[in-house]
Amino acid sequence: MKLLALQRRMARAVMTPLTPSEHMRSVAPNGGSMRAVASEIIKPNDRLTSFERLEIYNRQYWFRILSGFAEDFPGLRSVLGGNKFDRIAKAYLADCPSQSFTLRNLGARLEGWLRKNPQWAGTRLQLALDMVRLEWADIEAFDGAAEPPLKPEDLADANPAKLRLRLQPYIQLLDLHYPVDDLLLEVRKVEEDTDFASNAFSERHHRKRVSAVARLKTEPIFLAVHRMDDSVYFRRLEAEEFAILRGLRSGKPLNSAVESALRKSSIPAEERPAHVQHCFQTWAALGWFCRIDQDDSQGNSAAEVSSRGARASRNERPSKSNSAAL
Amino acid sequence: MPANRFNNFTDYGIGIGLRATHYNHILTRKPVVDWFEIISENFMIDGGRPLGILDQILEQYKVVQHGVSMYFGSAERPNREHLRRLKALVKRTNTPWLSDHLCWGSVDGRYTHDLLPMPYTFEAARITAQKVREVRDYLEVPVAVENVSSYAEFHVSEMTEWDFLNEVVERADCGILLDVNNIYVSSKNHNFDPLTYVNSVPAERVAQIHIAGHSKYRKYILDTHDHPVIDPVWKLYSRAIERIGHTATLLEWDDSIPSFDEVHDEALKANRFLASASLATAV
């Protein structure tokens, strides 16, 4: 058997979902016998059959990716509960196996998959989607690219009608139906606490978390998931702020982004200049804008830089609440 | 012997893996460590804390890159995005050599994130060696391939694992990262004499050695990197050092990671074997 054919056959077997008791299935993906597949490619030894040897890899594969997935989406687990989360994880990973050299990207297609397969989230679909978007944004913000921040002197000769400010690539802008930021922070806090706590303590917090999810009511929020001093923060935004930032990210010139964002605003006209000025001061202080060269400041568009990369250990990525931001 | 073209003529001592759980200890206490091995994929990113930490480590320590997903033995071509990011990291760390595993783990663009064993065939050796050459030429840094622990053997194999290793490194003209724990684990799982393996490795190509702990189950042994090194593995290490000479050595401890000092102390046990190798060379 040629190398490619062998690798295809083995990978297919290894990536076949396990039985409910976490063993290798007896039926192969092609409907035939998994024992026959194993016997055809793998030698038995004096202790293990071909099937048992293949099963070691099959179990390792699922344990590894399920563990990585659970590490990345503790909020989704909280929203759906353990059993439903486990079912979603297995279904998603069976449909969308990793296409990246890094496990960091395991959840990259989860939002799209969940929209196409809403039955897995049941009545909590929107809440689940919001949480997935937030947890993925958190991953992106954690290790996305950062460019040198804008300095006041960069804008000295800028023409606001043509100026295109670029947001830092790591910033993620989210419009959500539920206040899942608070919930995720609570989930993280419980995770940290249980590192040092007794089972009883953990159980009490688990119940508290479940009831927090049950109480969660629809409340549209706008969020910037950003990074400061290498920590990720969730910062709530007003609708107008969100619209301005989204306009800038889409490449609109400064004036145009502000005007279209304030068109339907309830902020009194006379207060708008001061409001906008305050927003920009805050965002600039947070380092949210990238430095622009002279051409950009005169109005030439600049391409957005996508923020992608590998993930590091989960415990390096603690997100913080708004309070720590300016 | 220790400094050779496969480790860029360096003479590193005993290192340990750089792990997040030890960051704080390392950056605040600044312990004396010969070198750190990093998992390349953890730093093949665009920004954020991991790169900030790495830059601080690079200011004070020597760092060598070790990868887990190049999959030299996969039949498909190298992933261009992977190579591009890896090259950027090589420039950042200035790693004197770079290692990854003699295994496969992806097919048709799908990744298992596991170190799957090779069929020991001449076709596989040819494909693997070609890929090692391609990666090395692109990265412009010496490459060493590491033997993996395995739990399965293929009917199609035409040679032993050590013959396969030799075939690949000769064809690719690359180095070896000799993992003596992996040799031990595989020897138990496949009933061969681990000393035969150690004695068959071309000593002049060994760029680095790995030592580690493992977990024993009723019918097989798993390479778990969550225990101290056991005596039989130290004996293999001793024999390897006897043949190869004073070689850059790294302790892997990736799960249930104890304190920095405990990991470092375990690694430093290698000193007693390295010292005798140095003595033998002097005599």
Image: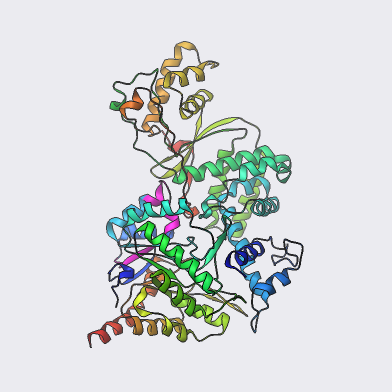
Instruction: Inspect this view and state whether residue A51 appears.
Output: no
Q: Is residue B31 magenta?
A: no
- Residue located farthest toward the left when viewing the structure as drawn: B282
Check the image and name the residue furthest to the top. A270
Was residue B46 drawn as part of the magenta stretch in this picture? yes
Number of dots carrying numbers? 0
Q: Is residue A142 above or below residue B271?
A: above
Which stretch is magenta? B32-51
Name above or below for residue B139 compared with residue A41: above
Quarter holding the N terminus of chain A?
A: bottom right
Give B59 or A112, whichever is nearer the viewer: A112
* Rendered residue at 46%/24% (across/down): A252
**Left or right of A144: which side holds A72?**
right
> Residue A41 location in percent, x, y?
65, 72
Seen from the viewer's position, the closer of residues B245 and B171 is: B171
The colour style of the image is rainbow
Residue B140: % across, % down: 34, 59
Rendered location of residue A170, percent (x, y): 45, 39
Name the residue located 41 percent from the left edge and 66 percent from the top edge. B259
Q: Quadrant of the C terminus of chain A?
A: top left
- Residue A162, x across and y down, in percent: 39, 20
* A160 w.r.t. B206: above or below: above
Any part of residue B137 in sight: yes
Q: Nearer the viewer, residue A11 or A225?
A: A11
Q: Is residue A47 left or right of residue A251?
A: right
In front here: A216 or A160?
A: A160
Q: Residue at x 64, y 61 (%)?
A: A15
